[in-house]
Image: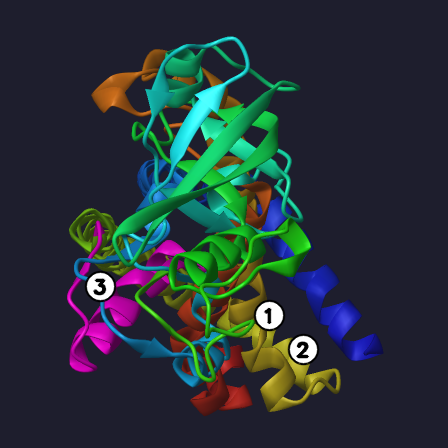
Amino acid sequence: MRRFVTLSGLALRDLLHGWPSTLCLVVAVAVALVPVLLLGGLSQGVVENTLSRLRSDPRILELKLANDQQIPQDWFDRLALDGRVGFLLPRARYLAASVRLRGEESRGIAEPRLIPTAPGDPLLAALPVPAGLSETVLTERIAQELEVGAGTEVEVIIQRQVGESREAARHKLKVLAVLPRDLMQSDDIFVDRAFETAVERWREGYAVPELGWEAVPGRGLDAPARTFASFRLYARDIRDVPGLRDGLMAEGFDVTTRAEEIEAALALEAGIGWVFSVIGSFTVLGFALTLGLHLAAAAMEKAREISLLRLMGFGTGSVAALPSLQGAMIALAGAVLAAGGVLAAQPFVNHALAGIGGLQGEIMALTPLLAALAVLIACGAGMLSGCVAGWRIARMQIAEGLRHD
């Protein structure tokens, strides 16, 4: 460690002694890296902006079943263990979940469909979630139609056919909140899954004691084995939607998604990343080659001094490491200069490009962490650039260096 500190001090003092040449190299490295950092910040900002916009819309994560099927409970249990699943609930048959709804003050009657919900529902992330058998969240359209809002009550009317007669059951639900129109434009209402199950059971002729609804003569409390007609399924992340879609379709489910939008955004991310990698690689290779040639020429010019260091007890490997240390120092200074300049200019770039292409937020997003990573890569390239000069020094004999003019 003591020898490394000594060598580092010698390398730094040598660079400071020839400061005009060193300054030119530092500026050259900075000029080479600035476009790469600008491109990296812009690509990061555009991609993250696009993906964030998709992630902010919970509907982009949804996978819908096109047609009702018979799905057993064990299928839901198995799918719930999939790490790609963010939210999953069984759904009743379309007709079984259709009800009539009336407001306290409204004369009109709406005919929504019940949507089962539970804690963690992506659509109700910012709203209270109905719990139990007497709470609901309405969509904005149906709330306006019935002239009701949060804190009011609505009456649910459920009908079933029993032989030649028709029976009706009524139940009141408290409105917890109203879902904004931009999240859902249908007339459906959100209820606890237990309430949807109760409605379906009663329509099938079974009793619902907790609501006071009686069974059809000859029926008990519930069917011996229940199946479900559909599901509410949301992926954990937008990257999981295409895989879940393909898996469900392989099982024979006809599902609709917005996976095409996600795949387009991911293709954009991959394309920009490839372009950035190619440009960045050529840039780093170019400045490393230029810096390496300069260090090799400088090493030959200082052959006498290097030989004297070896006579003073410095080993061949230690002396050969001098060009690499100087390359790392030059690259470090240039990369810090470039990263600092780009970070300082970033707010002005974002202001100039605000709103372009319909993008919101930061268009350029070079974070300090990414800038630090770029500096480390540049230092590594600078260190490698000195290897050729170090190899040449290692092969040089002491006598040869002392005779060098």
Question: Rounded to the nearest whole Å, what is the CA distance between mark 1 and mark 2?
Answer: 6 Å
In the rendered structure, which amino acid carries the disc numbered 2?
A: Leu
* Pointers 3 and 1 in contact (C-beta within 8 Å): no
* Pointers 1 and 2 in contact (C-beta within 8 Å): yes
Secondary structure category for the residue under label 3: loop
In the rendered structure, which amino acid carries the disc numbered 3?
A: Asp
Image quadrant where residue 34 sits: top left
- Horizontal and vertical percent for residue 196? 48, 53
Circle number at residue 68: 3
Q: If the image is split into quadrants, where does the C terminus sit?
A: bottom left
Circle number at residue 269: none
Of tags 2 and 3, which is closer to the observer?
A: 3
Which label's residue is closer to the chain start, 2 or 3? Answer: 3
Question: Rounded to the nearest whole Å, what is the CA distance between mark 3 and mark 1?
Answer: 85 Å
- Residue furthest right in the image: 2
Q: Label 1 belongs to which residue?
A: 305
- Boundaries of the magenta span: 232-258
Question: Rounded to the nearest whole Å, what is the CA distance between mark 2 and mark 3?
Answer: 84 Å
Magenta stretch containing residue 238, yes or no?
yes
What residue is drawn where x is 38% and y is 22%? 142
- Horizontal and vertical percent for residue 31? 36, 37
Seen from the viewer's position, the closer of residues 104 and 122 is 104
* Pointers 2 and 3 in contact (C-beta within 8 Å): no
Seen from the viewer's position, the closer of residues 144 and 43 is 144
Q: If the image is split into quadrants, where does the N terminus sit?
A: bottom right
Secondary structure category for the residue under label 2: helix
